[in-house]
Image (cartoon, rainbow, N blue to C red):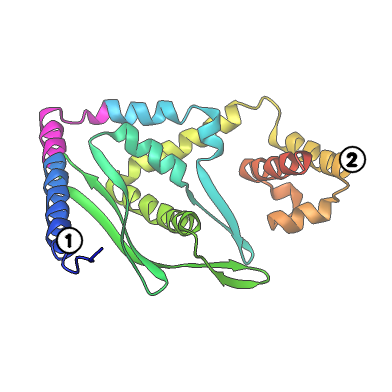
């Protein structure tokens, strides 16, 4: 058989046509979203009430904030789970991330949040090296699934920042306060007694002394917060599950 050396000459044209069609289709979808947002504008009061109602769910309230220790102080903030819940209930918003390209062992990624009604947009473009950091050293990622998980993990924080740049700050503060209220009201036992119970459980069931808990959380047991107890509960469940 004689090989046709010209068989692939039309591939670039086909690829460009497919790319152009995809771009046109995406543009039409965006235009449709904008038209629907203008046709059905946001009821701010109703949107606020939906967000606060969502924050009354205990599972969401438990995941509403991240917390870690920096030096002698704690750093807290709104988690991506709460940010997503607020964006969904705020309405007329498009948010997420797009991998722009992969080159030289890293991905160029764009995270965004777009209020389709007011045409307010937040974007963040950043690079994600295809490297996983471990205590034993760094090693490159080669499998597509590992690369995607690395990109998604890095993009989640940027998406959260974009969402929080769109939704009014007073709404965010009310949502966080409602999550705190949900956690407190859901427990009839005072926080002091909950802390003592967690310390007793750690020592009796898991042979973990109070000093280790304090080192892990980063403060004395008397200063543990409800978020700290939730963190310890997750650790205890992980140990129980092996």
Residue 198, compared with residue 48, is above or below; it is below
Secondary structure, magenta segment, majority class: helix
User: Which residue in the protein does label 2 denote?
Assistant: 204
Q: Nearer the viewer, residue 26 or 183?
A: 26
Q: Quadrant of residue 157?
A: bottom left
Q: Position of residue 235 (x, y in %)?
A: 71, 45
Q: Nearer the viewer, residue 68 or 140?
A: 140
Residue 228, compared with residue 177, is above or below; it is below
Q: Quadrant of residue 1?
A: bottom left
Describe residue 90's horizontal placement relative to residue 71 as left or right. Answer: left
Describe residue 204's horizontal placement relative to residue 167 as left or right. Answer: right
Q: How many marks?
A: 2
Q: Residue at x 44, y 55 (%)?
A: 148
Q: Residue at x 74, y 47 (%)?
A: 222
In magenta, the rendered stretch is: 31-45
Q: Quadrant of the C terminus?
A: top right
Sort mark 1 into few (<14), some (14-19) or many (20+) by Cα contacts within 10 Å.
Answer: few
Question: Would residue 107 be counted in the magenta stretch?
Answer: no
**Label 2 vs label 1, nearer the camera:** 1
Res 11 label: 1
Q: Quadrant of residue 69?
A: bottom right
């Amino acid at each position: 058989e004689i090989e046709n050396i010209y068989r692939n000459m039309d591939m670039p044209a086909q690829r460009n046509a497919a790319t152009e069609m995809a771009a046109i289709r995406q543009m039409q979808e965006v235009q449709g979203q904008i038209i629907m947002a203008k046709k059905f504008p946001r009821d701010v009061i109703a949107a606020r009430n939906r967000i606060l109602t969502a924050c009354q769910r205990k599972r969401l309230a438990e995941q509403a904030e991240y917390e870690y220790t920096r030096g002698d102080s704690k750093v807290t903030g709104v988690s991506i789970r709460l940010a997503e819940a607020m964006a969904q209930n705020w309405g007329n918003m498009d948010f997420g991330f797009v991998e722009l390209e992969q080159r030289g062992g890293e991905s160029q990624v764009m995270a965004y949040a777009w209020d389709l009604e007011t045409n307010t947009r937040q974007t963040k473009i950043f690079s994600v090296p295809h490297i996983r950091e471990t205590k034993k050293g760094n090693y490159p990622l080669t499998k597509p699934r590992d690369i995607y998980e690395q990109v998604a993990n890095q993009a989640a924080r940027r998406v959260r920042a974009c969402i929080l740049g769109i939704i009014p700050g007073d709404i965010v503060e009310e949502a966080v306060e409602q999550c705190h209220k949900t956690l407190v009201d859901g427990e009839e036992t005072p926080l002091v007694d909950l802390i003592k119970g967690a310390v007793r459980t750690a020592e009796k069931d898991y042979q973990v002394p109070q000093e280790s808990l304090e080192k892990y959380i980063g403060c004395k047991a008397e200063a543990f917060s409800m978020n700290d107890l939730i963190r310890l509960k997750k650790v205890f469940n992980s140990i129980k599950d092996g």
